Image: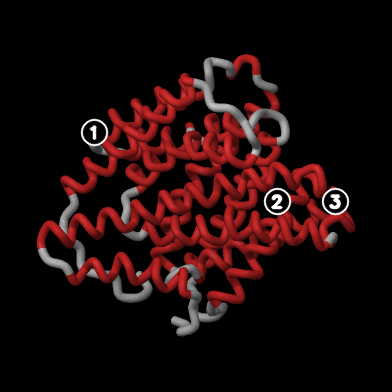
Amino acid sequence: MDEPRTAAVGVAVSAPEAAGALDGGGRASRRTLAPVALVLGGVLSVQFGASVAVLLMPRAGVVGVVTLRLVLAALVLLAVCRPRIKGHSRADWGTVLVFGAVMASMNLLFYQAADRIPLGAAVTLEVLGPLALSVIVSRRLGNVLWAGLALAGVVLLSGGGFDRLDPVGAAFALAAGAMWATYIVFSARTGRRFPQADGLALAMAFGALLTLPLGIVEAGSKLVVPSTVGLALGVALLSSVLPYTLELLALRRLPAPTFAILMSVEPAVAAMAGFLVLHQDLSLTDAVAIALVIAASMGAVRTRAGKAAPVEPATGKK
């Protein structure tokens, strides 16, 4: 495991592990809340990054924005993590390559949707993927009930207007949701096979290689305009580097069903980001929908915290 890490990555890793030093219920509670905080921090980051990306699309096109986002994120992660290339099994490489392909597909599909339908509607449709995963994978009635409440909020947030959306854009958003559910599965597997964010760095690099030819064909020289690159770097940090790192670390200690339910706050945060960055108004119906998805997420956290058992702190690669 390489020693040099950024302060952000170091804190994210040490916080959950430090909780292992506590005793009894305090240890279990802190070990539950730490990954929850990581997930919610990632949600905030990725949605504000998406708002900036929408502003960037007229400059570089949809595929160009995705290409810049993944390439710049890969460069940052490779520089920070300096992952080992040798010493990994064929199964390790298979997992990380699928993870990279899923990330590239998820981003391409979502930005194609955001280019055709409103950002809030795109996120609302996309989040159905993780919600479906939470119902399919969960073995607890509580998780199914909280997922149902979150789904009610998601439907309400749509305003009942899915039938009025561009059908191609809606299809892209639903496909992005399927990739998001797959991302959750392979992010957890990558986190177990690679130390810290090394697997994420390798997967991001592979995803960037997959999208680079497409981005060059669509945007060409627009990809190297300094102002565009500067904005894209902000998108890469907000939408890829920070949230994917936080989510990967969280999934080492958080069950996939609980993680998927927490992801239901995405439409609420997207609405807030749209209001602050894109100046999109929030209606009373939107506010009620946001309250529902937040209530569902809080219920999932409480259910998880009430049944959490003390776990020994992680020690390096799993």
Image spot of residue 73 (x, y percent): 63, 63
Q: Amino acid at mark 1?
A: Gly
Q: Secondary structure at mark 3?
A: helix
Instruction: Give the residue displayed 65% in from the left and 33% down from the top.
Output: 172
Residue where numbered disc 2 is placed: 66
Horizontal placement of 64 versus 18: left or right?
A: right
- Looking at this view, name the residue that lies furthest to the left: 24
Horizontal placement of 112 versus 146: left or right?
A: right
Q: Earlier in the sequence, mark 1 or mark 2?
A: 2
Q: Colour scheme of this structure image?
A: secondary structure
Residue where numbered disc 3 is placed: 219
Instruction: Give the residue displayed 53% in from the left and 18% down from the top.
Output: 159
Labelled pair 1, 2 in contact (Cβ < 8 Å): no
Instruction: Give the residue displayed 63% in from the left and 43% down from the top.
Output: 51
Horizontal placement of 44 versus 277: left or right?
A: left
Q: Earlier in the sequence, mark 3 or mark 2?
A: 2
Labelled pair 3, 2 in contact (Cβ < 8 Å): no
Q: Amino acid at mark 3?
A: Ala
Residue where numbered disc 1 is placed: 142
